[in-house]
Amino acid sequence: MIVKETSKIFAGVCGLYCGNCPIFRARRDGHVEFLEFLANTIGVDEVSCDGCRSENCWSGDCYFKKCARERGVDFCSECPDYPCPQLLEFSEMASHRRVILENLEKIREVGWRRWIEEEDRKWRCPFCGSKVSFYNVKCPSCGAKLERV
C-alpha cells in the first residue's frame, strides 16, 4: 500500500520533509541505480527509506525520533529544550537541513497537516507536476530546469 505523501509519516520530528529527500524520492520513484550508487558510495549493502517516521527510515534509530519518543513530543519544537544544541548542529551539517528551524516554526504556527500539504505542493515540478527532491536541478520526469533548487 502506498501512503499519501501528505501523511504524518513524511514529517520528520526534526522538521525535515521526506517528500523532497533524494533517498526517499529514489525509493518511491524507482530510481534503483541511484540507490545502488549511494549504497556503494557510503559502503553499505542497501540504502532505502519509506519516510522519517516509518520503520524503514534510512538513518535507522534517529537521535531526534528517539529523543522525542522519550520526551513524549511529536516534533522537536514542542520540547522545552527547543532548539537544543544537537538540533542546531544537525541543521548546519547539510544545505537541505538549513530549513528545519523554519519548518518547525511553520508546523507550530499552522499545524503539521497544513505544513505538509504546502511542502507537497512546493516540491513539484512547475511544468509536469511530478515530485522532485531537494537537490534536483532538473525534473527527473520531464527534464525541465528547476529554478528554486
Image (spheres, helix red, strand yellow):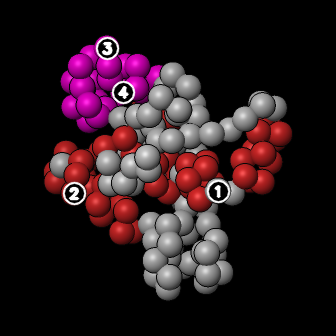
Residue 132, percent from left and from top: 53, 66
Residue at coordinates 40% horizontally, 34% vertically from top-left?
53
- Which mark is drawn over residue 137? none
In this rendering, position of residue 148 left or right of residue 112: right
Q: Which residue is mark 2?
A: 114
- Which mark is drawn over residue 30? 1
In the displayed structure, 29 sits above or below 85; it is below
Residue at coordinates 56% horizontally, 40% vertically from top-left?
49
Callout 2 amino acid: Arg
Callout 4 amino acid: Cys
Q: Which residues are magenta?
A: 63-85
Callout 1 amino acid: Gly
Q: Which residue is mark 4?
A: 84
Residue 134, percent from left and from top: 54, 60
Circle 3 crowding by C-alpha within 10 Å: few under 14, some 14–19, many from 20: few
- Helix, strand or loop at label 2? It is helix
